[in-house]
Amino acid sequence: MNKKTIIFWLVLVPDVILLYAGLYISALLRFGRISDVQQNPAYFNTFTIIYAFWLLVFFIHGLFETPSFRRYSSLFFNLISAMVINFLIAVMYFYLQPNLILTPRRFLLINVGVAFVLILVWHLLVKYFLKSRFIEGVYLFSFNNELVELETEIKHQGYLGYKVLGHVNEKNLELSSFEKNANIILPDNLHANPQVSENLYKLRTLGVKFYNHKNFYEQLLRRVYLSQINEIWFLENINYQEKRFYNLIKRLVDLIFGLVGFLGFAISFPFCALLIKLSSRGPVLFIQERIGKKGEIFKVYKYRTMSGGATNTWTSVNDPRITGVGKFLRKSRIDEWPQFINLLLGTMSLVGPRPEQPHIVEELKQKIPFYDERHLVKPGLTGWAQLNIYAGSVEETKLKLQYDLYYIKHRSFLFDLEIILKTVYYIFTWQGR
């Protein structure tokens, strides 16, 4: 069981226990006894359904993942955001039922507060545990500092639970140099030095674990190690055959979301059109050519969020061309709603790499190796890269490509579901750009 899985269960199972403990503590605070809840199965049954939704909201907020423990402030505000949404879900569940059994107004408020305190305390303890008890040491083996990028990421993201203990090369490779049960990260070019391989083999008696640096980087950061991949990596890691069943189900999901989303787009259009027209001159929608699957050109539809019409330049964070109304549309992701047309047409999918303009693609293909590989799959309204970085330059696009290639390598129904749920979280927390 890897570290991420351990942390997932270390948080999930206690959270479930604490939610039910909070139910009885709330009864004690509200009624002065817990017998009212114990003797009335409606409480247990109803709150079990509600807690299932609450746990889903926790998952969407990333509260079961190591990045949520990066800073105390992010942990605190993520949990507040989750509990506010959970309260609204509970209210909707209680008061939209045709046959209302419970009306726990004050009880629900108390339960939300108790659950928040209990879970916050546990998550703070887990953060402390991760910081002081759950750190694994790694040694970096390299001939010519090939692992500098990996070392930088380990140092900058200490919440992931690793610490660089030292550097190793062919000159200081001795049994006495390592702690027992240590981790050694290895480069790709070991086969060129049989003596080094033989010396490393001897370390197995110490219980030393070995990792290829690319695999370790990918597992740690959920993006590929772009700077050192080559043609062989793609042949060994990317499936170039069509996944027929996966593509069929994905298309059905696209059609369902496309129909529902198009209805929302149609309803919103008069209001958005009026706001856009009042804020600046230009068309309500802009239509732009983009590069899709296998390099095919298609037209994408969006609400206009900038002064004037469509542009052929990079859009940066806080771009001065973005209008006041445009900021709202971007933050709420409403500017993307016209792209439900693309879902229905089949030129885009719900999840996939973000499509770019043809001239930008040509520019990036010249500057970034293997950039064209992201066109192996259909572009998406949302995607793994969009959740992790907003690219407004060539360097940022390199990082974005690392996430795109990670998605292409690991794409599956569960990964798509994770991306969809986290996109919902980004919308609720106003993180659109």
Image (cartoon, grey):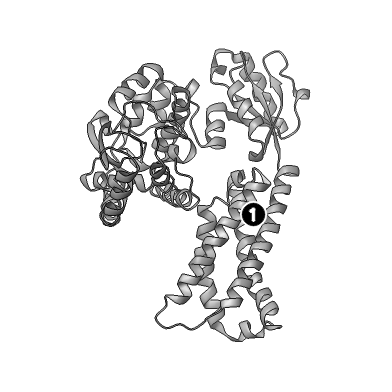
Where is residue 352 shown, x and y percent of the image? 36, 40
Task: Please tell me whether residue 9 is drawn above or below residue 330 in the rendered image.
Answer: below
The foreground one among 114 and 196 is 114
Which residue is pictured at 26% across the width and 57% down the height? 263
Q: Is residue 261 visible?
A: no
Locate residue 305 relative to residue 33 in the image: left or right: left
The structure residue drawn at horizontal position 60% and vertical position 77%, both measured from the top left corner, is 106
Q: Is residue 362 visible?
A: yes
Residue 63 image position (x, y, % from top left): 58, 52
**Measuring 40% from the left and 41% from the top, which residue is drawn there?**
383
Can you identify the residue that label 1 sits on?
A: 10
**Please, what is the three-letter code of the amino acid marked with disc 1?**
Leu
In terms of depth relative to the viewer, which is nearer, 264 or 125? 264
Q: Secondary structure at mark 1?
A: helix
Residue 125, placed above or below residue 93: above
Q: Quadrant of residue 131?
A: top right
Residue 395 lies, in percent from the top left, at 47, 23
234 to the left or right of 223: left
Given the current orientation, which residue lies at the most extreme left position?
A: 345
Q: Residues within 10 Å of mark 1 (few under 14, many from 20)?
A: some
In this picture, is 241 found above or below 424?
above
Front-lying residue, 124 or 208: 124
